[in-house]
Amino acid sequence: MSSRIVHHIRSLRSFLGRRSKVAFLAAASILASLVASHSEAAQDYLLGPQDVLRIRVYEWRPSTGAPFEWVPLTGEFVISAAGNLSLPIIGTVPAAGKTLEQVSESIGTRLQNQVGLQKRPNASVEISAYRPFFVTGLVATPGKYSFSPGLTVVQAVSMAGGVGPVDTNIISLQRDALTGRGEMRALEAERLELVARQARIDAILDNVPEIRFPDELTSRKAEPGIARMLTEEEALFETRLRSMETEIGSLNQAKVLAANQISALKEKAVSLAKQIDLANKDLGSVNKLVQQGLTVSARQLGANQNLADLESRNLDVSLAILKTQQDLAKVDQDIGDVRNRYRINALTEAAELRDRFASNAKKMQTAGDLLRNLEVRAPAAIAALEEDKDTYAFTTSINRVVNGSNESLIVDDNDPVLPGDVIRVERRQRGAPASVPTSN
């Protein structure tokens, strides 16, 4: 209430103290003109739920020659959620959507009709406290705030601490969110690395000449990190493949040499068999000559020694063939062992990968749950961490009841705020043009 109104109310009380009808009427006229001017200054403000009204009701009683105040109707009253004033004596008075003057007339008329007065009493109705407005979205301290006439959007947002978080709690939450997002990125990079490694192991186990990477990697191979990852896995696969092929190649060469050696020994065995056959014939001839006395026994001894030497050499060749055949079988076994060794290494690495996949999934789930918890606890703080740091990338809108329907209006900084408004500050989507503010 302005100082002029307070001054004139005091004058009214002075007039009332004189118990003069003329003085009362004059004072009432002055007060009515002040209330009217105050109402005009409010630009015919329409009342709504939660508005607090200060009401005083007087009437002039000729019988006593003094004004009478209706005490039960004097005081502060709150407009209910249904938009009504609940007043003593006269009951419920509709107030939402009406001006102060209309409510004043309704109170006077209802009282006159209720108690059967000849003249309508004078009701003084003023706004003691406006209904609050609300600020939500990307502001430091969203919540409910008291309204004052002439309030603008930028002033209302300033009352809520301005755009973005400023207190230490919000900064701490943002730090936790940044840490969580960094961990999520690291875990996702680790998961992609495991996927690439799994593709390499599958290629080894399937015994194919090249790696078949999944689409989630090949579709992103233009990214430097993914390209480096694929190149490293391909290089490791080719290195191990060449190493295995080198070992197997060496064993195959040994196998060829052993086979050639067996062939040579078999040819030698054939030659020795022929020599033994000839030696046996020669020994038979010598034995006949010795029996006939045509030769000496020394020749018979030499023939026996020659035959024994050939048979010994034939036995050595047979043993060499058996040993070489054993070596050949050992080479085949070594080739299988080389393949099995690489396969076992791949199976061992695959088992380790399964454990790492499971651990990575659990960590990602935990980190995601923590981030979602932070988003629930402080959505404004988390939303402010978007990569778009454009100072003007925010949109301010007001949800307001207009003619009984709720409307959303895009506003500018200097647009007025009305009681009951819900001001919402949001980050403009990337690529979306700035909305044209709607003047209210």
Image (cartoon, grey):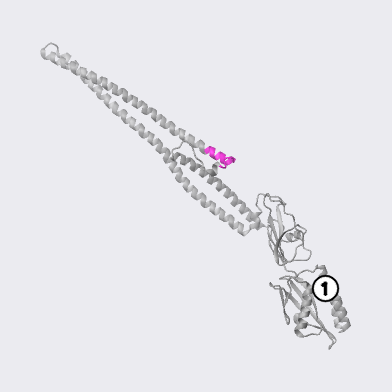
Rendered image quadrant of residue 152: bottom right
Task: Name the outermost residue toward the left.
Answer: 292
**Where does the magenta region start and end?**
219-232
Q: Of helix, strand and loop, which one carries label 1?
A: helix
Residue 278 at x, y = what percent? 21, 17
Membership of 225 in magenta stretch: yes
Q: In the displayed orientation, state which residue is furthest to the bottom.
A: 63
Q: Picture coordinates of residue 407 (x, y %)?
A: 70, 62
At 22% from the left and 22% from the top, the residue drawn is: 311
The answer to whether 235 appears left or right of 24 in the picture is: left
Residue at (12, 11) in percent of width and height: 294
Q: Nearer the viewer, residue 377 or 122?
A: 122
Within 10 Å of disc 1 (Cα), the crowding (few <14, some 14-19, many 20+) is some
Q: Nearer the viewer, residue 411 or 236?
A: 411
Residue 84 lies, in percent from the top left, at 71, 74
Q: Is residue 439 above or below residue 101?
A: above
- The residue depicted at 40 percent of the width and 35 percent of the height is 338
Q: Is residue 200 left or right of residue 79?
A: left
User: Which sits in the foreground, 434 or 203?
Assistant: 434
Assign the N terminus to one quadrant of the image.
Answer: bottom right
What type of secondary structure mainly makes up the magenta span? helix
For badge 1, the amino acid type reads Val
Tell me, yes or no, if residue 338 can be seen here.
yes
The answer to which image quadrant residue 376 occupies is bottom right
Taking the image as shown, residue 207 lies to the left or right of residue 154, namely left
- Vertically, is 109 above or below 428? below
Can residue 11 be seen from the camera position used here? no
Residue 157, quarter of the rendered image = bottom right
Q: Is residue 36 magenta?
A: no
Percent of width and height locating residue 404? 71, 67
| Residue position marked by numbered label 1 in the rendering | 35
The quarter of the image holding the C terminus is bottom right
